[in-house]
Image (cartoon, rainbow, N blue to C red):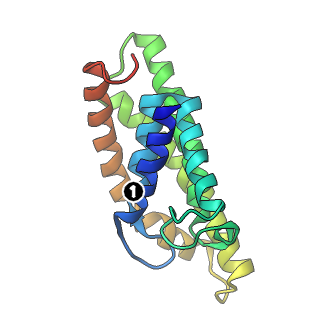
Amino acid sequence: MIEISIFAVLTAVGARLMVPVPFVPFTLQTLVCMLAGLLLGPKRGAASQALYMAMGLIGIPVFTSAAGPAAVLMPSFGYILGFIGCAWLSGCLRDMFFKKYGSVTRLQYFAAAMAGVAVVYLIGVAYLYVILNFWVKSGGATFFKVLSIGFFSTIAGDAAKAALAAVIARRLEAGGVFRN
């Protein structure tokens, strides 16, 4: 339970370490949600991200901007929903690699982290499209425009964070700090 809380708080800290850009700020949250899955496993990793989301929805200022129930109307809220799936899928794939090979390589950690990030983008971009077109009514944001705002502009940074997550997870697990 402590690890779940720690990763929820680390995700909140990651929200504050950001480069503000329109609609979807660049933060360290995706690094933390990848690590949550890789180090805590699918259930506890996803629980840490669900706890983070719940903290923000009850009004604790842990998101990059709005807090409370109104946060669901933020264009970037879909990415927060995706954090839960990211941690779960990253953890599932890490476990699959461990069961199949008896250990997990950096490349396998990277693949698991990138698959998790794909979930963040799948949910986040779809949510961004809906919010921009049906709530904000930004003049009919095309799907390509939404992709350029919410995917193309950030994927390179998230790939770098996935590589960093792979290195960190491998070292912490090899050092016995987290599960094997």
Decide if residue 153 is on the left or right side of residue 130: left
Which residue: 41% across, 77% down? Answer: 21
Helix, strand or loop at label 1? It is helix
Q: Quadrant of residue 143?
A: bottom right
Left/right placement of residue 20 relative to residue 119 reads left
Disc 1 marks which residue? Answer: 13
Camera-side residue of 82 and 50:
50
Percent x, y for residue 26?
A: 39, 66
Number of marks in the rendered image: 1
Can residue 119 be seen here? The reply is no
Percent x, y of residue 130: 70, 71
Which amino acid type corresponds to the residue marked 1 in the rendered image?
A: Val
Q: Quadrant of residue 167?
A: top left
**111 or 85, nearer to the observer:** 85
Q: Is residue 107 visible?
A: yes
> Residue drawn 25% across and 28% down?
171
Q: Please give the name of the residue rendered at 46% of the width and 79% of the height, measured from the top-left corner.
A: 22
Q: Compared to 179, does 56 lie above or below?
A: below
Extreme right residue here?
A: 134
> In the displayed image of the protein, which residue is found farthest to the bottom?
139
